[in-house]
Image (tube, rainbow, N blue to C red):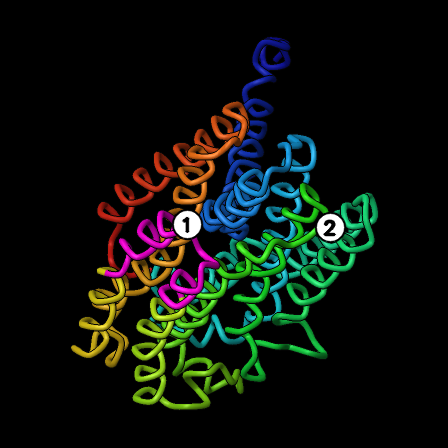
């Protein structure tokens, strides 16, 4: 009887409990990371980097501290938006049985991997962090732009505004990703928003709206059932496709017009125009009905390349600005930093492409 009470026999159940607890903790963290959708943060390197590159191009010295603040701010607001969206979009995501790896949410809440209240709580925490970051910015211009980004990002799906439920979601995404984030970054560097940055961003914003319409095409049926009125729901499938197709020549036409007016250097124009074949490919696939039947196998390549089309044209703009700045008197140290950021994006994008080729078509 005494042998049964020996201490060496007691730790086994405790070890098993500890291992089970550790496994559950790891699963929770993996689910939280899935909920955060960190892979979408790769894009943020580009509009922030482009803005800083334009500042250097205009003769301003590179301030690494405020560059880091601008980048961290963009990432914080982006993850906040993901947590907020997952909570307020839960009904729409549950109704979505045609999801892809790029549409229909992370599925972490839908599959019960994370409690909805955790997503909302994390969103509120990051809202507070974002607000503190706004408060420490050095000028009223930066604070106003940054505050606008936070407010629009939160009310993208949060009530009572719910912009993405009232036909304004696509425009809101373009306003933040291709407007406010780079504007904050350049104001932190240069104190103003150069016309060059606005001229470069305008065509990319048009493509961003089209990209979000492509993403929402894949969600249109489930969105309609829960009253989520995105542009594809409002206009219908055929009209939405026509608008997306029309946006492609409009964007590149704007870019060319700005180059002819002398607002965009021709080196920048050439780099950005090199991404036009992706527009052609997207138009061909949409006209062939790749998004019509909500087949995840056919939709996944379209939503993947529609999303990365915008990333690549912003990356091309950043490359063109860096090369054009190198022809002038810009500091080599600043250009080396920006070149390293762009090269890092290129490597991460190549890795993402490799993963996308290995992933199954469905969610």
Q: Considering the image in quadrants, where does the N terminus appear?
A: top right
Judge left or right: residue 35 versus residue 349.
right
User: 71 or 275: nearer the eye?
Assistant: 275
Hey, which quadrant is residue 286 in on the image? bottom left
Q: Considering the image in quadrants, where does the C terminus appear?
A: bottom left
List x then y, in percent, for residue 152.
67, 67
User: 14 or 165: nearer the eye?
Assistant: 165
Residues packed near mark 1 inside 10 Å, few (<14), some (14 to 19) or many (20 plus)? many
Q: How many marks?
A: 2
Mark pair 2, 1: CA separation: 27 Å
105 vs 338: above or below:
below
User: What label does residue 317 carry, if any?
Assistant: 1
List x then y, in percent, for residue 132.
80, 47
Secondary structure beneath dot 1 equals helix
Seen at 64% across and 47% down, the residue is: 185
Seen at 22% across and 47% down, the residue is: 357
Of tags 2 and 1, the one toward the viewer is 1
First-in-chain label (2 vs 1): 2
Seen at 45% across and 29% down, the residue is: 340
Image: magenta residue range? 255-276
On whether residue 262 falls in the magenta region, the answer is yes
Seen at 34% across and 58% down, the residue is: 309
Does the CB distance between marks 2 and 1 fall below 8 Å?
no
| Chief secondary structure of the magenta portion | helix
Hey, which quadrant is residue 104 in on the image? bottom left
User: 154 or 269: nearer the eye?
Assistant: 269
On whether residue 211 falls in the magenta region, the answer is no
List x then y, in percent, for residue 139.
81, 48
Residues packed near mark 2 inside 10 Å, few (<14), some (14 to 19) or many (20 plus)? many
Secondary structure beneath dot 2 equals helix
Judge left or right: residue 235 versus residue 227.
left
User: What label does residue 130 carry, if any?
Assistant: 2
């Amino acid at each position: 009887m005494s042998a049964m009470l020996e201490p060496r026999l007691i730790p086994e159940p405790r070890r098993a409990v500890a291992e089970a607890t550790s496994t559950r903790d790891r699963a929770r963290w993996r689910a939280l990371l899935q909920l955060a959708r960190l892979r979408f943060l790769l894009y943020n390197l580009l509009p922030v980097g482009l803005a800083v590159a334009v500042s250097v191009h205009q003769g301003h010295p590179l301030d690494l501290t405020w560059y880091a603040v601008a980048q961290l701010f963009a990432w914080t607001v982006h993850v906040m938006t993901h947590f907020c969206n997952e909570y307020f979009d839960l009904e729409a995501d549950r109704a979505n049985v045609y999801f892809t790896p790029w549409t229909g949410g992370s599925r972490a809440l839908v599959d019960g991997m994370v409690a909805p209240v955790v997503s909302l709580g994390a969103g509120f925490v990051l809202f507070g962090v974002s607000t503190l970051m706004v408060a420490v910015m050095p000028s009223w211009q930066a604070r106003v732009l940054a505050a606008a980004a936070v407010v629009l990002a939160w009310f993208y799906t949060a009530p009572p505004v719910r912009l993405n439920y009232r036909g304004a979601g696509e425009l809101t995404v373009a306003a933040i990703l291709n407007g406010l984030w780079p504007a904050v970054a350049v104001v932190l560097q240069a104190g103003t928003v150069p016309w060059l940055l606005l001229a470069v961003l305008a065509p990319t914003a048009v493509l961003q709206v089209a990209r979000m319409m492509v993403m929402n095409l894949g969600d249109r049926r489930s969105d309609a059932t829960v009253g989520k009125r995105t542009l594809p729901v409002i206009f219908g499938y055929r009209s939405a496709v026509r608008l997306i197709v029309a946006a492609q020549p409009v964007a590149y036409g704007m870019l060319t017009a700005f180059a002819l007016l002398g607002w965009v250097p021709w080196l920048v124009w050439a780099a950005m125009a090199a991404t036009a074949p992706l527009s052609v490919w997207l138009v061909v696939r949409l006209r062939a009905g790749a998004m019509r039947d909500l087949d995840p196998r056919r939709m996944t390549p379209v939503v993947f390349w529609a999303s990365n089309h915008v990333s690549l044209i912003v990356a091309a703009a950043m490359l063109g600005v860096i090369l054009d700045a190198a022809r002038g008197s810009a500091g080599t140290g600043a250009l080396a930093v920006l070149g390293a950021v762009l090269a890092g994006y290129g490597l991460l994008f190549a890795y993402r492409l490799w993963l996308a080729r290995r992933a199954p078509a469905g969610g």
